[in-house]
Amino acid sequence: MASNIRIGTRGSELALRQTSIVKSLLENLFPDAGFEIKTIKTTGDRILDSPLFKIGEKGLFTKEIEEALLDEHIDMAVHSCKDLPTVIHENLKIAAILEREDARDVFISHPKKPNRSFLSLPKSSVVATGSLRRKCQILNARQDIQVTDIRGNLSTRFRKLDESNWDGIILAKAGLIRAGCAERTTEILPYEIMLPSAGQGALAVEIRSGDSRIEELIRPLHHLPTASSITAERSLLHHLEGGCQVPIGAYGQLSGKELRLDAVIGSLDGKVLIKGSRTCSAADAVRIGIELAEDLLNRGGKEILNEIKKLNSLRR
C-alpha cells in the first residue's frame, strides 16, 4: 500500500474533526499506509457576511475541494453529504457513505434564559438559523417567533448566541456530537417538527472515477443502509433542483428491507408546508425520491419553488 495518501477537506473545526474520523478508520484498517489531511478553503468558507441562500452558487463547500481532486492534489475528499451537489463532475464519484449519525436538529437555548423547549418559547422570541429549511419549519410551528440569520462555525455560533439577546439557535445534532459539544443541546427536535436537510448527519468520501486503488481502500467504510437512505433523499432533491437556496427537508430511513422517505417543501413565511412520504424497497431508492418529489410539486410545491427562484434571481 503506497504511503502519503492525501485526504482533502474544508478547514473548519467540524470538517477537520469529521475528516479525522475517516482518517482514523483508514489507519486502523491499513496501519502500514500513511494518511495526511489537506485543508482547502471553499467559497462558502470565504463568504461569511451573507446568508447561504443569497450567495446563489452550487457547491459552496465542495467546488474547490473537487477541483483539487481532479487536479490530483489530493487522493480523496471528505464531505458532509448535505453539502454535496446532487450532480457531481463526470470524472468524480462518491465511493463511500459512512454510517449516519443522528440526523435530527436540536434547539439550543440562550444560557442565561430559562426556556428549555422550542414550542414553549414566549411570544416574539428570537431564534437564529442560517437555513431556509429550518426557518420555514420554525415559522410553521410558531408564527409568533422571529427568525434571524446566523453564519459561522460552531464556536462562532455559540459565541454569537451567548453575546446576543436571542432566545436560542437551531443546529444539527450530528455536528454537535462530532465536535464534542453535545452538552449544549437543550432539546432534540422531532422529525414531525423539523425534517433535516437531505444527507444531514452522513459523511461522504469522494474520489476520482477509475481510481481503483483508492476505491478499494475506501470500500470497507461504505454503509449500505445509510447509502440507501441518502440515495433516496438526494434523488428527491435532484428532481426538485434544490439546494441551500430553497426550503426543502428530506429524511430516509431503512427498516429491514423497507425504505421510508419523508419530505417537505415550505414557503418562506412558513404559512404553507407541503409534506409527503413514500415507502419502497431499498433497491428502489432513486424511484421513490422522484415519485415523492413529483407528488410534492403537484400539491403546490412547484409554485413555492418558482416564487423562491424569482426572489433569488432578484437578489443577485
Image: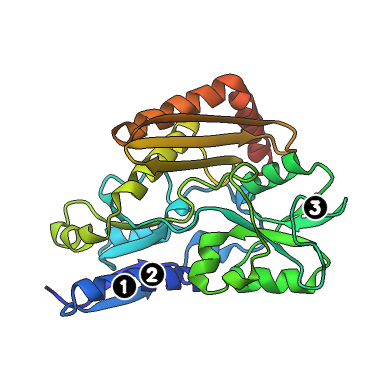
Quadrant of the rendered image containing residue 171 = bottom right
| Type of amino acid under label 3 | Ser
Q: Specify the label residue 181 is tagged with.
A: none
Residue 92, x across and y down, in percent: 28, 51
Q: Is residue 93 above or below residue 289?
A: below
Residue 229, x across and y down, in percent: 39, 43
Q: Specify the label residue 120 is tagged with.
A: 3
Asked whether residue 243 appears in the rendered view, the answer is yes
Secondary structure, mark 2, is helix
| Type of amino acid under label 1 | Lys
Disc 2 packing (10 Å; few <14; some 14–19; many ≥20):
many
| Type of amino acid under label 2 | Thr
Residue 95, x across and y down, in percent: 26, 53
Residue furthest toward the front? 256
Secondary structure, mark 1, is helix
Disc 1 packing (10 Å; few <14; some 14–19; many ≥20):
many
Q: Specify the label residue 19 is tagged with.
A: 2
Dots 1, 2 in contact, CB < 8 A: yes
Secondary structure, mark 3, is loop
* Residue at the spot 64% in from the left edge and 70% down from the top edge: 184
Q: Is residue 33 left or right of residue 236?
A: left
Q: Is residue 282 above or below residue 163?
A: above
Q: Specify the label residue 23 is tagged with.
A: 1
> Which mark sits nearer the N-terminus, 3 or 2?
2
Question: Separation of disc 1 and disc 2 at Cα?
Answer: 6 Å
Residue 7, x across and y down, in percent: 31, 69
